Amino acid sequence: MTEFISSKSVRLDQELASKLNIARNQVINLIKNGNVSVNNKIINKAGFNLNLGDKITILTPQISEIQSEFKADFDIEIIYEDDDILVINKPINLTIHPAPSVKEATLVEWLKQNGYTLSNLAGQERAGIVHRLDKGTSGVIVVAKNNESHANLSKQLSTRDMGRIYLLLCDLALKENCVIDRAIGRHPQNRLKNAIISNAKPSKSAFANILTSQNKMINLVAAKLFSGRTHQIRVHLASINRHILGDDLYGFKSNSAKISRIFLHAYILRLIHPRSSQIMEFKATLPSEFYGLIGKEFDKEIVDESIKANILCDIFNDISNWMYYN
């Protein structure tokens, strides 16, 4: 349960969006589902007019009681857990939350079926979900166990206090380390894709060469996000004619049966703990499939030395002189 006092006379949905730093549709879902009360009375109207000093309460439903038609009969590695957050290593081919087109158990259903208490700021279908990874992307993701943590972590995403570094295998080496600052929006012809679109949402990524094979056909690249658009890394790389191995949707081409997945992995997550304010860093071990490909060119020890967290973070500390695409 989350409580706060209205700071002014304003619509309920506007006050919630401001206080919680979440999207308006998430606010509307909270209100419509009967999870918001004002002065101890449930309010179902988003346009309800607040007065200065009104007590607003956000109720957390019993998530574990919500049933799903899909059984989440798989395991997920827990990297860290306390009363406020859960940090996991998401496996590939796992969708984050339910949707009409999804016909299998998702991460949210796994969380519910394993009895986790979750925030409800994003609604029941996205319970606990602060940020997403694509279905084909593996790696570290944080889940909010309560509304206070969710609001805090969402704000960190917005202010970029939450840092994310990805590792990927690319079909061509970068000419040099670069920053791509190009707006991303829905692809005009293919609803499954995003694309570089003028006047769309601002999007910024930085990319650094880590290891390049002798034939330059397999390249380990690190990416840092400065925004969080859907398919951002994939779209930005495609815009400079670079493609993640296995990413057929964005232009990768290969007849090799060994390309069994999209080789994109969320490797490092840095955040400020929502309760203690401690800076925390989490790392999801690089999957064995990555070593299987790049290991033909480099010993595992060389790969591991090159992707130490402190080395990768230092690389992105100063990007002012990098090649810039806009």
Image (cartoon, rainbow, N blue to C red):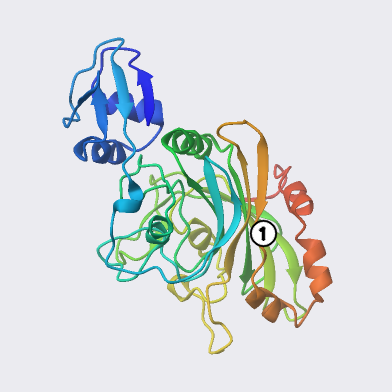
Q: Residue 269, can we see it?
A: yes
Q: Quadrant of the N terminus?
A: top left
Judging depth in this view, the residue of 207 and 87 nearest the camera is: 87
Occupied quadrant, residue 160: top right
Image coordinates for residue 47, horizontal then vertical, percent: 18, 26
Number of marks present in the image shown: 1
Which residue shows up at 46% across the image and 49% down it?
131
Residue 52 image-quadrant placement: top left
Q: Nearer the viewer, residue 146 or 247?
A: 146
Residue marked by disc 1: 222
- Left or right? Give the position of 263 relative to 213: left
Residue 195 position (above or below residue 130) = below
- Asked if one can make out residue 174 in the rendered structure from this viewpoint, the answer is no
Residue at position x 82%, y 63% from top? 305
Give coordinates of residue 326: x percent, y percent: 54, 49
Q: Residue at x 35, y 52 (%)?
A: 64
In this image, 214 relative to 66: left or right? right
Judged from this view, the residue extending furthest toward the top is 52
Height in image: 251 above or below 198? below
Tell me where residue 237 appears, x and y as whole percent. Answer: 55, 62
In the picture provided, is 274 more to the left or to the right than 99?
right
Q: Nearer the viewer, residue 237 or 62?
A: 62
Badge 1 density bin: few <14, some 14–19, many ≥20, Cα 10 Å: many
Q: Is residue 179 above or below residue 211?
A: above
- What amino acid is at disc 1? Ala
Q: Quadrant of residue 151?
A: top left
Q: Where does the image place residue 269, in percent across and percent down from the top left?
A: 62, 49
The local secondary structure at tag 1 comes to: strand
Q: Residue at x 29, y 36 (%)?
A: 27
